[in-house]
């Protein structure tokens, strides 16, 4: 959440900062601001609202200077107002700071500074941090490391998370960056340096980056940099290459990133499988698990943890892994697991799922597993992310950048990786080569079948218009399709703001049926699988109470067409892989409903993409 971009080089800073903010707007869009160092004073422009509002200010009076910091905000402390927008200044007005994260002890620090005569102009914890750094700076003798030392001294007093960039009018060309719990990346260009909270802001300018670790501090001096940490004077970090084309962060021919990413799923599924299908051995293969086969065979319990969409993918994985590999799987909501004293035994292996690899709760849950001496593997999309670097091994999705706040292609890629793991563990145990090869053949067909479903987008667009006036919707599924019902409901409420809930189909008669009326549509996932007849029975119960039904079914199912008001027909695949196909029309339905209602699909209210705060 929130986005930082900073620049020092030989070009005008404001245009680079503004374009970087546009690329990070999915991380927060309540307010935005830019601060450049123009000679011996700051040029500051900040504005509540979207970055377009800031751009209009900048256009009228462009900030001058070749060194600057900027920020796009997702509000934590204080409402989205001009005063609460970043950057914030210290008491002297000579130090400016942008900040991602939460300073948990900000009130204690604020009271201390108020007692020293400081005056605050916002409701934010960030302004307190700016004042604290400025206070220490003003108390120190002049030296080349004065600003660096002031930042270090202030951060030693801080409890919480931060990714920051700091300027001072006395230090032309100098920017201090630091992180703890909130991502920060150093971009290394030709005679210019950058800081950003995500590589998407940097791809147009450089392919060379350094991913900072927690407690790392970078001092940028013109076109040079040094790296330190809070407890070590000099550190070394690997320079990495960005592995995707900057054009992949553009919408292309689509109206929204969400729609683009839905339509990218045939390719993203193909990429998730590439190099991982072993046809000869009828299994899956992975290069980064960092565990020997004999160790993997001793695993008798898996823990899968994540949040939101990633959690739903893990829930689908639970069904597939238990069926194919016969290994007990526990699904843990990361925000709950991190504070529980969950008993773990010696043969437990954990998987942390996060598209960004920066989700605060998931990262904390993974660290809790590791703190207890157990191995935790990551499943994420972003190379160089914190989970990717701190996990004991893992699997990359290779889905490409996902900009849309509502996750789509990451869900299907995560679910596919779960299926590959199920096959992998199954073949290590009892699953026969015939069964493994059957599953592999079904996997290989998924990209083509996904493309076939996407060809129905006009039909789904019509259904969205038909049901867009609904005040609420119910989503039902059984077995591995129950998490898909949860995901479909999540997508609908995220982008359309229609209240939606997902349930196991059999729970209909245990209370939920009281809600059924002719004005409440129910979406029932009803493929021709082992619980097909049970799902038909649920649909009959809904129709008996005059509830409208949209059904997701198998191509050619005449019985389903007799019962449901509307049917979306999908190709048939292996029953355990059907969730990957079933979710796609639900994504499209949510998208087109939101468009019909005039919602801002890529920037839904109150949401941001990468949840890096609690």
Image (cartoon, rainbow, N blue to C red):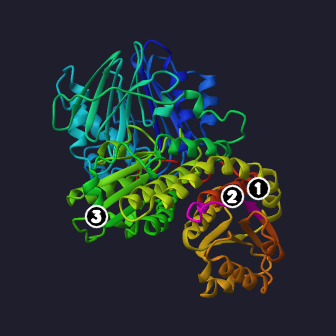
Query: Which of the two discs, 3 and 2, labels the residue nearer the N terminus?
Result: 3
**3D distance between C-alphas at marks 3 and 1:** 47 Å
Q: Earlier in the sequence, mark 3 or mark 1?
A: 3
Q: Could you say where residue 558 lies in the image, as x and y percent from the top left?
A: 81, 71
Observer-nearest of 272 and 477: 272
Image coordinates of residue 152 in percent, x first then y, are 22, 36
Circles 1 and 2, Cβ within 8 Å, touching? The answer is: yes
Mark 1 or mark 2, which has the lower sequence index? 2
Q: Which residue is mark 1?
A: 597
The boundaries of the magenta stretch are 568-579
Marks 3 and 2 sit apart, C-alpha to C-alpha, by 40 Å
Label 1 crowd (10 A; few <14 / some 14-19 / many >=20): some
Residue identifier under label 2 = 496
- Helix, strand or loop at disc 1? loop
Look at 21% across and 35% down and name the residue there: 229
Answer with left or right where residue 440 lies relative to residue 144. right
């Amino acid at each position: 959440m929130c986005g930082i971009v900073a620049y020092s080089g030989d070009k005008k800073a404001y245009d680079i900062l503004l374009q970087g903010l546009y690329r990070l707007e999915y991380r927060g869009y309540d307010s935005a601001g830019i601060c450049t160092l123009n000679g011996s004073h700051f040029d500051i422009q900040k504005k509540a609202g979207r970055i377009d509002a800031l751009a209009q200010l900048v256009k009228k009076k462009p900030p001058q200077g070749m060194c600057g910091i900027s920020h796009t905000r997702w509000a934590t402390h204080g409402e989205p107002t001009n005063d609460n927008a970043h950057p914030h200044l210290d008491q002297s007005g000579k130090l400016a700071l942008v900040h991602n994260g939460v300073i948990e002890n900000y009130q204690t620090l604020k009271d201390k500074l108020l007692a020293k005569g400081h005056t605050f102009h916002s409701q934010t914890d960030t302004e307190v941090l700016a004042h604290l750094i400025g206070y220490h700076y003003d108390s120190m003798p002049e030296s080349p490391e004065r600003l660096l030392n002031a930042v270090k001294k202030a951060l030693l007093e801080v409890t919480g998370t931060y990714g920051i960039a700091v300027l001072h009018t006395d230090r032309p060309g100098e920017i201090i960056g630091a992180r703890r719990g909130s991502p920060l990346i150093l971009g290394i260009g030709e005679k210019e340096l950058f800081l950003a909270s995500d590589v998407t802001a940097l791809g147009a300018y450089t392919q060379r980056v350094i991913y900072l670790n927690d407690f790392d501090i970078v001092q940028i001096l013109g076109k040079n940099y040094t790296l330190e940490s809070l407890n070590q004077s000099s550190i070394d970090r690997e320079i990495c290459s960005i592995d995707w084309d900057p054009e992949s962060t553009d919408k292309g021919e689509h109206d929204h990133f969400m729609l683009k990413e839905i339509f990218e799923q045939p390719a993203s599924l193909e990429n998730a499988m590439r190099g991982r299908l072993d046809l000869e051995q009828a299994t899956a293969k992975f290069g980064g698990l960092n565990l020997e086969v004999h160790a993997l065979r001793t695993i008798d319990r898996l823990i899968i943890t994540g949040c939101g969409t990633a959690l739903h993918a893990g829930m689908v994985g639970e069904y597939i892994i238990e069926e194919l590999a016969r290994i007990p799987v526990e699904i843990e909501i990361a925000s709950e697991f991190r504070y529980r004293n969950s008993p773990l035994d010696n043969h437990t292996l954990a998987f942390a799922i996060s598209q960004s690899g920066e989700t605060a709760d998931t990262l904390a849950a993974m660290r809790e597993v590791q703190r207890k001496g157990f191995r935790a593997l990551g499943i994420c999309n972003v190379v160089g992310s914190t989970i990717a670097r701190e996990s004991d091994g893992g699997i990359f999705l290779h889905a490409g950048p996902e900009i849309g706040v509502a996750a789509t292609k990451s869900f299907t890629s995560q679910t596919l990786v779960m299926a590959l793991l199920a096959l992998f563990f199954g073949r290590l145990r009892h699953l026969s080569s015939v069964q493994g090869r059957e599953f592999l053949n079904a996997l290989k067909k998924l990209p083509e079948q996904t493309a076939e479903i996407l060809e129905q987008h006009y039909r789904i667009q019509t259904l969205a218009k038909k049901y867009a006036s609904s005040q609420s919707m119910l989503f039902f599924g059984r077995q591995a399709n129950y998490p898909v019902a949860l995901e479909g409901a999540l997508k609908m409420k995220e982008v359309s703001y229609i209240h939606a809930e997902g349930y196991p189909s059999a729970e209909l008669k245990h209370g939920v049926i009281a809600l059924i009326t002719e004005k409440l549509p129910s979406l029932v996932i009803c493929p021709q699988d082992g619980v097909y007849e049970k799902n038909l029975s649920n649909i009959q119960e809904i129709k008996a109470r005059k509830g409208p039904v949209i059904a997701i079914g198998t191509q050619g199912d005449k019985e389903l067409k007799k019962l449901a008001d509307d049917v979306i027909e999908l190709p048939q695949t292996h029953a355990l892989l059907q969730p990957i196909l079933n979710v796609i029309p639900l994504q499209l339905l949510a998208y087109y409903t939101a468009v019909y209602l005039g919602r801002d699909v890529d920037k839904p209210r109150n949401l941001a993409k990468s949840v890096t705060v609690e």
